[in-house]
Image (cartoon, rainbow, N blue to C red):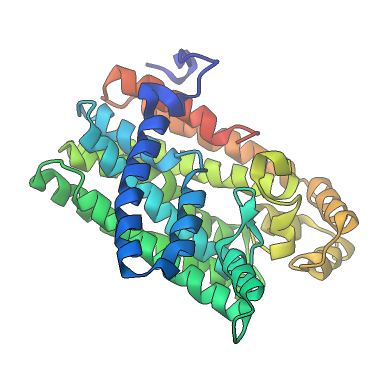
């Protein structure tokens, strides 16, 4: 099928993320799994209740993109709809929870999904309880441990999903690579902040390993591996998933600067306060005049940056053409992704949903 003939035929009033009621089923599997873990923690000590509560609250939010791509990677490879495949895909939500909690610690973020970030939540608990020592130190330590729990539980849910042992073993190999790439990408992101940012090319490397592979390409590979897919389908999924993952993260970066807090769950311009060295920022710096460069460097990463400062940085990013450049790159990568999907030999119902997911992942309001 030629790219020009790609038609999105999913119900426009229903998100492709809800095909096969997947989000409802993922939430149910999370709820059931967490009920088991909460019982275990309660048996250890009632003092662990704040850990359970923080994670249950966090897991109520999110778009469920990673489980969706894993599940439809499975279906595209000919896997049948069953709760065991849903459970395997759901494990990625616990891995994502680990990544979010630790990422918020590293970035010093105040909020996540419209709520206090985990380390802020535990710091507030410490402060309100008038415990000894540093509230901030307690919050950081508790959040790191909570993220570690999520990492452990993600493995547990995947390994006990109920699929045949040989299928799980194939999937685990992909899952292990995905975790390594994610942690490597996280370090590269930290490094960019430490060295003050570099080229747009270096920023794109962070996009690829911290987000693109982990969000779309590897979840697709996980589903395919669980289903025993041939190598050519893995290659096709990369052709679709990697550029789409890059487009998804670039969209997220744009929303981190220009997004509506009601949509993003974070204060307006929060990525600017955190000093994130995104492709958007790197492109602006490469095209900026000396005066504009000075304004960016003076304000980027200022935790006290006010609305006027955010507006000034937004104006420079727009004036330098960085915003238009990134928007064009998102469109180009999305088209590249859809072209690869057009030629892939996959189940047609899965293809239709994956087309819809491509639009959902790069939408301006995601």
**Which image quadrant is residue 197 in?**
bottom right
Q: Looking at the image, which is closer to me, 168 or 135? A: 135
Q: Looking at the image, which is closer to me, 132 or 242? A: 132
Looking at the rendered image, the quarter that the C terminus falls into is top right
Percent from the top left, x then y, of residue 251?
61, 42
Q: What residue lies at 87% left-to-right and 54% top-to-bottom?
A: 307
Q: What residue lies at 56% left-to-right and 69% top-to-bottom?
A: 106
Q: Would you say 66 lies left or right of 267 here?
A: left
In this rendering, the answer to whether 6 lies above or below 334 is above
Looking at the rendered image, the quarter that the N terminus falls into is top left
Q: Would you say 19 lies left or right of 327 here?
A: left
Residue 147 visible to the viewer: yes
Q: What residue lies at 38% left-to-right and 52% top-to-bottom?
A: 94
Q: Looking at the image, which is closer to me, 109 or 310? A: 109
Percent from the top left, x then y, of residue 140?
55, 74
In this rendering, the answer to whether 196 lies above or below 200 is below
**Which image quadrant is residue 332 in?**
top right
Q: What residue lies at 54% left-to-right and 42% top-to-bottom?
A: 248
Percent from the top left, x then y, of residue 222?
27, 44
């Amino acid at each position: 099928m030629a790219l020009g003939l790609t038609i999105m035929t999913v119900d426009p009033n229903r998100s492709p993320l809800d095909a096969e009621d997947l989000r409802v089923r993922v939430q149910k599997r999370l709820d059931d799994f967490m009920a088991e873990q909460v019982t275990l923690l309660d048996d250890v000590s009632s003092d662990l209740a704040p850990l359970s509560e923080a994670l249950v609250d966090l897991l109520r939010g999110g778009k469920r993109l990673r489980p969706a791509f894993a599940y439809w990677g499975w279906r595209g490879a000919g896997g049948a709809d069953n709760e065991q495949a849903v459970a395997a895909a759901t494990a990625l939500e616990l891995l994502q929870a680990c990544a979010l909690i630790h990422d918020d610690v590293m970035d010093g973020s105040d909020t996540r999904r419209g709520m206090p970030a985990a380390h802020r939540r535990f710091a507030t608990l410490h402060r309100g309880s008038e415990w000894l020592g540093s509230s901030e130190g307690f919050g950081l330590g508790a959040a790191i441990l909570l993220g570690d729990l999520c990492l452990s539980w993600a493995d547990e849910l995947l390994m006990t999903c109920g699929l045949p042992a040989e299928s799980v073993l194939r999937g685990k190999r992909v899952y292990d690579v995905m975790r390594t790439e994610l942690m490597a990408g996280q370090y590269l992101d930290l490094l960019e902040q430490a060295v003050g940012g570099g080229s747009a090319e270096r920023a794109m490397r962070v996009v690829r390993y911290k987000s693109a592979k982990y969000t779309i390409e590897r979840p697709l590979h996980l589903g395919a591996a669980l289903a025993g897919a041939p190598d050519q389908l893995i290659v096709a999924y990369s052709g679709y998933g990697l550029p789409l993952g890059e487009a998804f993260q670039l969209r997220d970066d744009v929303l981190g600067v220009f997004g509506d807090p009601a949509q993003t769950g974070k204060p307006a311009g929060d990525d600017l306060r955190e000093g994130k060295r995104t492709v958007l920022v790197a492109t602006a710096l490469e095209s900026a005049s000396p005066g504009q460069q000075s304004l960016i460097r003076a304000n980027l990463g200022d935790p006290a940056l006010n609305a006027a400062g955010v507006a000034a940085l937004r104006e420079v990013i727009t004036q330098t053409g960085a915003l238009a450049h990134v928007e064009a790159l998102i469109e180009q990568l999305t088209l590249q992704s859809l072209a690869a999907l057009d030629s892939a030999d996959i189940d047609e119902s899965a293809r239709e949903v994956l087309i819809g997911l491509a639009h959902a992942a790069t939408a301006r309001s995601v």
